[in-house]
Amino acid sequence: MRISRFSSSLPLLLVPFVLVTGGCSGGKKKGDVTGTVNLDGKPLGIGRLRFILPSGKAAEEKSAEIKDGEFSVKGVPVGENIKVTIDTKTVEMRAKPEAIERRIAEIKSSKATMVAQSKNAPADQKPDFTRFDEQLKEAEAELKESKDLAKKFRPVPAKYADEKSTDISVTIKPGDNTLDPIELKSR
Protein backbone atom coordinates (compact mmCIF):
# COMPACT_ATOMS: atom_id res chain seq x y z
CA MET A 1 0.00 0.00 0.00
CA ARG A 2 1.44 3.32 -1.06
CA ILE A 3 0.70 6.52 0.90
CA SER A 4 1.24 9.76 -0.89
CA ARG A 5 3.27 12.50 0.69
CA PHE A 6 0.20 14.78 0.76
CA SER A 7 -2.08 12.32 2.61
CA SER A 8 0.57 11.57 5.24
CA SER A 9 1.06 15.28 5.96
CA LEU A 10 -2.67 16.07 6.05
CA PRO A 11 -2.99 15.52 9.82
CA LEU A 12 -0.13 17.96 10.42
CA LEU A 13 -1.81 20.58 8.24
CA LEU A 14 -5.03 20.30 10.25
CA VAL A 15 -3.37 20.80 13.68
CA PRO A 16 -3.24 24.65 13.46
CA PHE A 17 -6.88 24.73 12.27
CA VAL A 18 -8.01 22.55 15.18
CA LEU A 19 -6.02 24.63 17.66
CA VAL A 20 -7.49 27.88 16.37
CA THR A 21 -11.11 26.72 16.13
CA GLY A 22 -11.25 23.97 18.74
CA GLY A 23 -11.61 26.20 21.76
CA CYS A 24 -14.10 28.58 20.24
CA SER A 25 -17.71 27.93 21.12
CA GLY A 26 -18.83 30.90 19.13
CA GLY A 27 -20.40 32.63 22.09
CA LYS A 28 -20.64 33.15 25.79
CA LYS A 29 -20.42 30.31 28.27
CA LYS A 30 -23.66 28.71 29.37
CA GLY A 31 -24.98 26.95 32.42
CA ASP A 32 -27.69 24.38 32.99
CA VAL A 33 -29.94 25.37 35.87
CA THR A 34 -32.25 23.39 38.12
CA GLY A 35 -34.06 24.48 41.24
CA THR A 36 -37.25 24.76 43.23
CA VAL A 37 -39.79 27.53 43.78
CA ASN A 38 -41.96 27.76 46.88
CA LEU A 39 -44.88 30.06 47.58
CA ASP A 40 -45.49 30.58 51.30
CA GLY A 41 -43.32 27.56 52.06
CA LYS A 42 -45.13 25.15 49.70
CA PRO A 43 -44.04 24.11 46.19
CA LEU A 44 -45.50 26.37 43.49
CA GLY A 45 -47.79 24.08 41.47
CA ILE A 46 -47.32 25.72 38.08
CA GLY A 47 -45.69 28.85 36.73
CA ARG A 48 -43.08 30.24 34.37
CA LEU A 49 -39.58 31.33 35.38
CA ARG A 50 -37.44 33.62 33.24
CA PHE A 51 -33.83 34.82 33.54
CA ILE A 52 -33.05 38.51 32.85
CA LEU A 53 -29.41 39.53 32.26
CA PRO A 54 -28.06 42.63 34.07
CA SER A 55 -28.17 44.45 30.71
CA GLY A 56 -31.95 44.11 30.85
CA LYS A 57 -32.09 41.58 28.04
CA ALA A 58 -33.89 38.33 28.65
CA ALA A 59 -31.28 35.60 28.87
CA GLU A 60 -31.72 34.71 25.23
CA GLU A 61 -35.36 34.04 26.11
CA LYS A 62 -34.34 31.26 28.46
CA SER A 63 -37.28 30.35 30.57
CA ALA A 64 -38.60 27.26 32.24
CA GLU A 65 -41.94 25.90 33.22
CA ILE A 66 -42.35 25.31 36.92
CA LYS A 67 -44.19 22.09 37.75
CA ASP A 68 -44.78 20.91 41.28
CA GLY A 69 -42.27 23.49 42.47
CA GLU A 70 -39.40 22.30 40.24
CA PHE A 71 -37.78 23.69 37.11
CA SER A 72 -34.89 22.88 34.81
CA VAL A 73 -33.45 24.87 31.90
CA LYS A 74 -30.37 24.36 29.75
CA GLY A 75 -28.08 26.90 28.11
CA VAL A 76 -28.55 29.94 30.33
CA PRO A 77 -25.80 32.58 29.88
CA VAL A 78 -23.48 32.71 32.88
CA GLY A 79 -23.11 35.75 35.07
CA GLU A 80 -23.85 37.43 38.37
CA ASN A 81 -26.95 39.36 39.43
CA ILE A 82 -29.15 37.68 36.85
CA LYS A 83 -32.70 38.64 37.74
CA VAL A 84 -35.39 36.00 37.90
CA THR A 85 -39.05 36.62 37.18
CA ILE A 86 -41.78 34.18 38.11
CA ASP A 87 -45.18 34.45 36.54
CA THR A 88 -48.37 32.41 36.86
CA LYS A 89 -50.54 34.53 34.52
CA THR A 90 -48.96 32.94 31.45
CA VAL A 91 -50.10 29.46 32.55
CA GLU A 92 -53.35 30.38 34.27
CA MET A 93 -55.53 29.70 31.21
CA ARG A 94 -54.27 26.12 31.07
CA ALA A 95 -55.66 25.67 34.59
CA LYS A 96 -59.19 26.60 33.51
CA PRO A 97 -61.02 23.51 32.22
CA GLU A 98 -64.23 25.29 31.14
CA ALA A 99 -63.08 25.98 27.56
CA ILE A 100 -61.97 22.38 27.10
CA GLU A 101 -65.29 21.13 28.48
CA ARG A 102 -67.10 23.27 25.88
CA ARG A 103 -64.89 21.86 23.12
CA ILE A 104 -65.69 18.29 24.24
CA ALA A 105 -69.41 19.09 24.15
CA GLU A 106 -69.03 20.52 20.61
CA ILE A 107 -67.17 17.42 19.39
CA LYS A 108 -69.84 15.12 20.85
CA SER A 109 -72.62 17.24 19.36
CA SER A 110 -70.99 17.29 15.91
CA LYS A 111 -70.51 13.54 15.98
CA ALA A 112 -74.13 12.97 17.06
CA THR A 113 -75.36 15.21 14.23
CA MET A 114 -73.31 13.29 11.66
CA VAL A 115 -74.47 9.94 13.05
CA ALA A 116 -78.11 11.07 12.78
CA GLN A 117 -77.61 12.43 9.25
CA SER A 118 -75.93 9.27 8.04
CA LYS A 119 -78.35 6.85 9.70
CA ASN A 120 -80.18 6.00 6.47
CA ALA A 121 -77.11 6.23 4.21
CA PRO A 122 -75.93 3.09 2.41
CA ALA A 123 -73.18 1.24 4.29
CA ASP A 124 -70.55 2.19 1.70
CA GLN A 125 -71.39 5.91 2.14
CA LYS A 126 -71.35 6.09 5.94
CA PRO A 127 -68.78 8.59 7.24
CA ASP A 128 -65.71 7.58 9.20
CA PHE A 129 -66.02 8.81 12.77
CA THR A 130 -62.37 8.15 13.64
CA ARG A 131 -61.53 11.86 13.45
CA PHE A 132 -64.16 12.68 16.09
CA ASP A 133 -62.96 9.87 18.34
CA GLU A 134 -59.34 11.06 18.08
CA GLN A 135 -60.32 14.68 18.80
CA LEU A 136 -62.42 13.57 21.75
CA LYS A 137 -59.62 11.44 23.18
CA GLU A 138 -57.15 14.33 22.81
CA ALA A 139 -59.55 16.85 24.41
CA GLU A 140 -60.29 14.51 27.31
CA ALA A 141 -56.55 14.15 28.01
CA GLU A 142 -56.23 17.97 27.94
CA LEU A 143 -59.20 18.23 30.30
CA LYS A 144 -57.59 15.86 32.78
CA GLU A 145 -54.34 17.83 32.67
CA SER A 146 -56.23 21.12 33.04
CA LYS A 147 -58.14 19.86 36.09
CA ASP A 148 -54.89 18.66 37.65
CA LEU A 149 -53.31 22.07 37.01
CA ALA A 150 -56.37 23.85 38.45
CA LYS A 151 -55.87 21.97 41.72
CA LYS A 152 -52.24 23.14 41.86
CA PHE A 153 -52.69 26.71 40.63
CA ARG A 154 -51.85 29.53 43.04
CA PRO A 155 -51.20 33.03 41.70
CA VAL A 156 -47.98 34.78 42.67
CA PRO A 157 -47.86 38.51 43.38
CA ALA A 158 -47.24 40.68 40.31
CA LYS A 159 -43.95 42.00 41.72
CA TYR A 160 -42.28 38.66 40.98
CA ALA A 161 -43.37 38.71 37.33
CA ASP A 162 -41.92 42.17 36.62
CA GLU A 163 -38.20 42.44 35.95
CA LYS A 164 -38.16 45.94 37.51
CA SER A 165 -39.75 44.90 40.81
CA THR A 166 -38.53 41.34 41.32
CA ASP A 167 -36.06 41.01 44.17
CA ILE A 168 -34.80 37.63 43.04
CA SER A 169 -31.34 37.41 41.49
CA VAL A 170 -28.95 34.52 40.99
CA THR A 171 -25.42 33.74 39.87
CA ILE A 172 -25.04 31.19 37.10
CA LYS A 173 -21.71 29.51 36.47
CA PRO A 174 -20.63 27.35 33.53
CA GLY A 175 -21.85 23.77 33.79
CA ASP A 176 -24.50 22.45 36.15
CA ASN A 177 -26.13 24.83 38.64
CA THR A 178 -28.55 23.82 41.37
CA LEU A 179 -30.00 27.01 42.83
CA ASP A 180 -31.00 27.47 46.45
CA PRO A 181 -34.79 27.21 46.82
CA ILE A 182 -36.53 30.38 45.64
CA GLU A 183 -38.96 31.46 48.37
CA LEU A 184 -41.92 33.65 47.39
CA LYS A 185 -44.41 35.31 49.72
CA SER A 186 -48.02 35.89 48.72
CA ARG A 187 -48.18 39.00 50.90
Image (tube, helix red, strand yellow):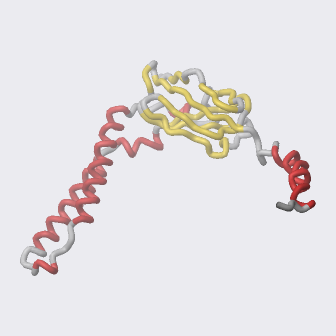
**Residue depicted at 58% across the width and 37% down the height:** 73
User: Is 182 situated above or below 122?
Assistant: above
User: Is 29 situated above or below 170?
Assistant: below
Left or right of 153 on screen, residue 167:
right
| Residue toward you, 3 or 179 | 3
- Please identify the quadrant where the N terminus is shown: bottom right
Classify residue 72 by image quadrant.
top right
User: Is 58 situated above or below 115?
Assistant: above
Classify residue 35 by image quadrant.
top right
Query: Among all residues in the image, which is located at the extreme top?
Result: 41
| Residue toward you, 97 or 144 | 144
Can residue 151 be seen? yes
Can residue 161 be seen? no
Left or right of 5 on screen, residue 42:
left
**Residue depicted at 66% across the width and 45% down the height:** 60
Classify residue 29 by image quadrant.
top right
User: Is 167 situated above or below 97?
Assistant: above
Left or right of 166 on screen, residue 27:
right
Q: Position of residue 134 (x, y in %)?
A: 27, 59
Q: Position of residue 4 (x, y in %)?
A: 89, 62
**Residue depicted at 88% across the width and 56% down the height:** 8
Left or right of 150 on screen, residue 179:
right
